[in-house]
Image (cartoon, rainbow, N blue to C red):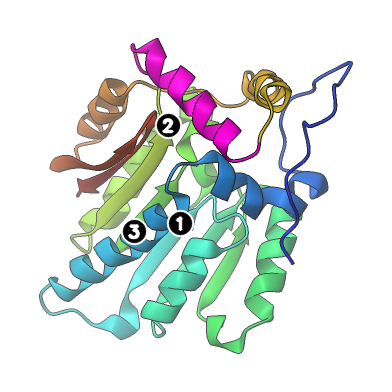
Amino acid sequence: MQKIDKLYRDKLEYVGDFCFDEKTVEVFDDMLNRSIPCYRKIINNIILISKYHMQNKKHIDTYKSTFYDLGASTGSISCALSYEFPYSCIYAVDSSEPMYKELNANIKANPSFSNIRPILNDASKVNFEASDIVISNFTMQFVNKSLRADLLGSIRSALMKKNGIFIISEKVLLQDNHIEFLYDSYKQSKGYTKNEIEQKKRALKSVMHLDTPEDIETNLAKAKFSHVTKWFQCFNFMSWIAFA
């Protein structure tokens, strides 16, 4: 049974930096479902986009298709990809050891997920194989900004070999403060208190480094992706498809 996120419910004397430790892992799926607008729909549509892309590739050999799920967490996207592409190779990457253990347990619990290969590593340190699709679903915002350009370049190089796509979802910085207020109201509608919301903001301040939508698109262009299109936005959460 999914545990409810209550990490910041009590008033804390000291709010430390947010981290992906055992306590976070226990409630992480609930946290995502209640914190990211349309989270399940985003995942469903990432799978839809992946299916459309693979179906429209010429001379495709599904037995040799390769996917990367960066910041795989508990494996929601990797497992959904495994179901749709059972003969592919799916690399599920996460840098948190507690999250990696949970991911590994979820994979081992179902024999049909045998094509998922969990990797304990920072996304910025991955040696990418030639890839059909790379997915970064609310992960890049936790990567040090000084490492993002090289990471995007590595992803694009891996995708170039197979005419692939990069799907990147991010929480973004917007000029309109009303959106932030609306997002806070959204979280309250999901059961979070004002105290929880404020304490989590403080916890994330030093570890989650957001970009503007314009910066994200500029960085993708600098990495030489041929075309970038935004396919999703709800409040200050967006997702793009970048074509190698």
User: Which SS class for mark 3?
Assistant: helix
Say which of 189 and 147 sits in front. 189
Say which of 25 and 147 sits in front. 25
Residue under circle 3?
A: 46
User: Which SS class for mark 1?
Assistant: helix
Query: Does residue 27 appear to the left or right of 88 in the view shown?
Result: right
- In which quadrant is the N terminus drawn? bottom right
- Judge the density around disc 2: few (<14), some (14-19), many (≥20) Cα neighbours within 10 Å: some
Residue under circle 2?
A: 148
User: Which SS class for mark 2?
Assistant: helix
Cα–Cα gap, marks 3 and 2 = 22 Å
Query: Does residue 8 appear to the left or right of 227 in the view shown?
Result: right
Q: Amino acid at mark 2?
A: Arg
- Callout in the foreground (3, 2): 3
Q: Amino acid at mark 3?
A: Ile
Say which of 46 and 88 sits in front. 46
Picture disc at residue 40: 1
Residue 149 in the image: state x and y as whole percent.
Answer: 37, 30
Q: Main secondary structure of the magenta part?
A: helix
- Who's the residue at 45% across and 71% down the image? 80
